[in-house]
Amino acid sequence: MSEQPEYDLPLFPLRTVLFPGGILPLRIFEPRYVDMIRWCMREAKGFGVVLLREGSDVLDGNAADEAKRQGAHIFDIGTAAQIIDFDQADNGLLGIVAQGGEKFSVQSSYVETDGLMRARVRSLPEVAQPLPPGYESLVSVLKDLLTHPLIQELDPQVDFEQDSSVGHRLADLLPVAPELKQWLLEMSDAEQRLRELQDIIKQLAS
C-alpha cells in the first residue's frame, strides 16, 4: 500500500478514544474548541480526536502552555471526526455529536496563539473484510451491548458481517480503560483485534 499524503488537522485531546464509525457526543465550553467547532462547521471540515496520556480533559493555566503540555502527552494515533449534529444549550455550552472516520498518525504538531493544537497527520486506512468464522460470540456480546438504552440513544451503526466494524464497535462500547482502547485502536490487523477482544471479554466475565 502506498504511503498516504499528509494533511493538516485541528486536534481535540481527550481522555476518550474514538474509533472509526464511533459516535462521540461532546459539550464544549473552552473558547479555542468552540472556535474550532465553528470553523469546522463553516468549512465543512473535521477535527482529530487523540487520547491524552494522563491528566484530565481540561487542564488549568494559559491555553497555549496547556496545549504544549498536551502535545507532549498525546498518543500518536487518533481518529478523524466529522460533526453530524449540534445544538446550543441554554447554559451556553455548545453541544455536538461527532462520528469517527479514518484513523491517522500524527507526523508533527504545533500550537496556535489561542492554544489550539494542530497537526500534520497521515491517514491509516483499514480495509474491511468479511467477518471470519469463529467470532460469533463477539457478535452476540455486541448485540447485547447495543440493547442498552444509553447506547441506543447514540444509535451506533455496525455491520455484523464485517471484521473492522464488529471490532471497532466492541472496542468502543466495552467498559475498559482508555489505554486499552487505544491499544486496540492502534492495531492494523482487524482479526488480531478480534482475537484480543475475545480474551478481554473472557477476563471481564471471569
Image (tube, rainbow, N blue to C red):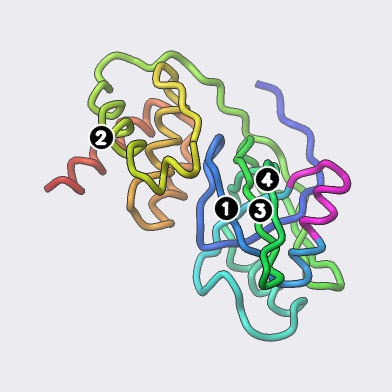
Q: In this figure, which residue is indicated by the disc labeled 1?
A: 25
Which corner quadrant of the image does residue 89 belong to?
Answer: bottom right
Badge 3 element: strand
Q: Residues within 10 Å of mark 4 (few under 14, many from 20)?
A: few
Instruction: Report the span colored magenta.
Output: 36-46
Toward the viewer: 91 or 134? 91
Residue furthest front as drawn: 90
Q: In this figure, which residue is indicated by the disc labeled 2?
A: 198
Indicate which disc, 3 or 1, sits on the residue closer to the N terminus. 1
Q: In this figure, which residue is indicated by the disc labeled 3?
A: 96
Q: Is residue 2 above or below residue 156?
A: above
Give residue 8's position: percent from left, percent from top: 81, 47
CB-based contact (under 8 Å), mark 3 and mark 1: yes
Three-letter amino acid code of the residue under disc 3: Ile
Seen at 37% across and 57% down, the residue is 177
Mark 3 or 2: the one toward you: 3
Q: Is residue 45 above or below residue 157?
A: below
Three-letter amino acid code of the residue under disc 4: Asp
